[in-house]
């Protein structure tokens, strides 16, 4: 199938079959799609937490707006962004870049100095607003890869960030949750949305050409 066909196939599943689990191979492909997502300055200022342990999911349910979807999904991916930028984080990322490329450390010093100057003049709240936006590119690619594999997904912002962050100890990692991605296989008989037409506004209204 083409990407367009895959995207037409997928929808935000409202009921999952708890007896069906996504294979480790497919989970890893979806995670790799997220890992390969482009990010501002190549900093990858977020991490993806993979939750498949049922006991842990049960704890997280109290923070979910759609608890049954969380409970019955095969996996929950938590997209969590850096809570702030720092000179140390920037240096760590660019040291890794130069090491992998067999370049001397500091090769991009003029560029990283500019980044440090820009972010140094911003608040932690502004930092998080920027890092959080980066996660949505990875979220989209993860959903596209899942659709190609015929793995169902449901993106979610309807949850208590405080509860999820506390349960997963994200603060200790310098991270804050941004969005969730439930994954699994649809329970079509109990999903009110499964047989409904996909609805998007018409192309001629969606696209503005100048």
Image: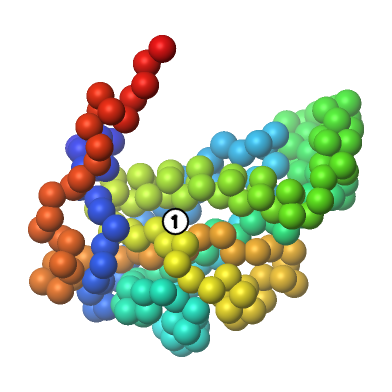
Picture quadrant of residue 194? bottom left
- Left or right placement of residue 84 versus residue 161 in this view: right
User: Residue placed farthest to the top in the image?
Assistant: 210
- Left or right placement of residue 142 versus residue 47 in this view: left
- Left or right placement of residue 4 versus residue 82 in this view: left
Residue located at (25% from left, 37% from top) = 201
Q: Give the position of the C terminus as an image quadrant.
A: top left
Residue 167: image location, x then y, percent: 60, 80
Residue 69: image location, x then y, percent: 33, 73
Residue located at (15% from left, 74% from top) = 190
Q: Secondary structure at mark 1?
A: helix
Residue 161: image location, x then y, percent: 58, 70
Front-most of residues 54 and 104: 54
Q: Which residue is label 1 attached to?
A: 28
Colour scheme of this structure image? rainbow
Q: How many marks?
A: 1
Residue located at (67% from left, 70% from top) = 170
Picture quadrant of residue 195? bottom left
Residue 41: image location, x then y, percent: 70, 34
- Left or right placement of residue 193 versus residue 72 in this view: left
Residue located at (24% from left, 78% from top) = 19
């Amino acid at each position: 199938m083409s990407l367009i066909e895959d995207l037409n196939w997928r929808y935000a599943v409202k009921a999952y079959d708890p007896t069906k689990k996504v294979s480790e191979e497919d989970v890893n492909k979806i995670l790799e799609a997220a890992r390969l997502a482009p990010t501002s300055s190549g900093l990858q200022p977020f991490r993806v937490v993979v939750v498949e342990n049922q006991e842990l999911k049960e704890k997280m349910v109290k923070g979910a707006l759609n608890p049954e979807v969380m409970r019955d999904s095969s996996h929950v991916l938590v997209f969590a962004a850096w809570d702030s930028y720092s000179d140390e984080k920037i240096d760590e990322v660019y040291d890794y870049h130069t090491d992998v490329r067999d370049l001397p450390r500091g090769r991009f010093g003029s560029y990283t100095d500019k980044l440090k100057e820009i972010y140094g003049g911003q608040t932690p709240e502004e930092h998080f607003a920027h890092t959080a936006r980066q996660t949505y590119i990875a979220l989209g690619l993860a959903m596209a890869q899942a659709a190609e594999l015929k793995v169902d997904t449901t993106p979610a912002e309807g949850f208590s960030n405080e509860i999820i962050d506390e349960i997963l100890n994200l603060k200790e990692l310098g991270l804050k949750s941004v969005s969730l991605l439930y994954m699994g296989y649809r329970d079509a008989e109990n999903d009110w949305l499964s047989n409904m037409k996909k609805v998007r506004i018409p192309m001629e209204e969606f696209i503005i050409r100048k």
